[in-house]
Amino acid sequence: QVQVVESGGGLVQAGGSLRLSCAASGSIFRLNIMGWYRQAPGKQRELVADITNGGTTNYADSVKGRFTISRDNAKNMMYLQMNSLKPEDTAVYYCNLRNLGLHQYYDYWGQGTQVTVSS
């Protein structure tokens, strides 16, 4: 079994910064992708950024240049540094761990952490 737990959300003014953390534990495959997703009220969950176990990153266009994803494989931790926050970044942010098996993958989700950006 795998568990992922987010932390670090909160309320911040526009232009401010927050850092989210995700702790993973359990049966983590050697090949995996960790990612941050977010869901705003009335909208679908969307990918914010993800990072492979090898360190390759991918960002949504809306956060490029403002957010930075990173991970510490030794500690099974992932981070999201969010700078220049905008009100439209307000959402519940979810950590995802995707274990990559030979023929299929397995997704694990955290409970989410609220990020609210005031204008």
Image (cartoon, rainbow, N blue to C red):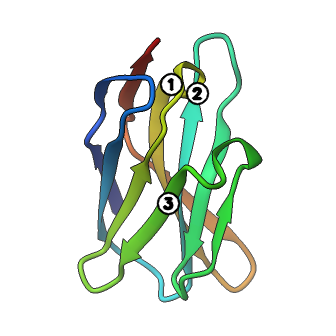
Mark 3 neighbour density, 10 Å: few (under 14) some (14–19) many (20 or more): some
Q: Secondary structure at mark 1?
A: strand
62 horizontally vs 54: left or right: right
Residue at 47% x, 82% y: name it. 29
2 and 1 marks in contact (CB < 8 Å) = yes
- Disc 2 target residue: 39
Going from the N terminus, do you reach mark 3 or mark 2 first? 2
Give the image location of residue 43, x and y in percent. 69, 18
Q: Distance of mark 3 from mark 1, alpha carbons?
A: 17 Å
Front of the two marks 3 and 1: 3
The answer to which quarter of the image holds residue 8 is top left
- Disc 3 target residue: 68
- Check residue 69 in the rendering and tell me which mark sits there, or answer none: none
- Depth order, front residue of 22/56: 56
Give the image location of residue 4, x and y in percent. 34, 54
Residue at 43% x, 21% y: name it. 117
The answer to which quarter of the image holds residue 102 is bottom right
- Disc 1 target residue: 91
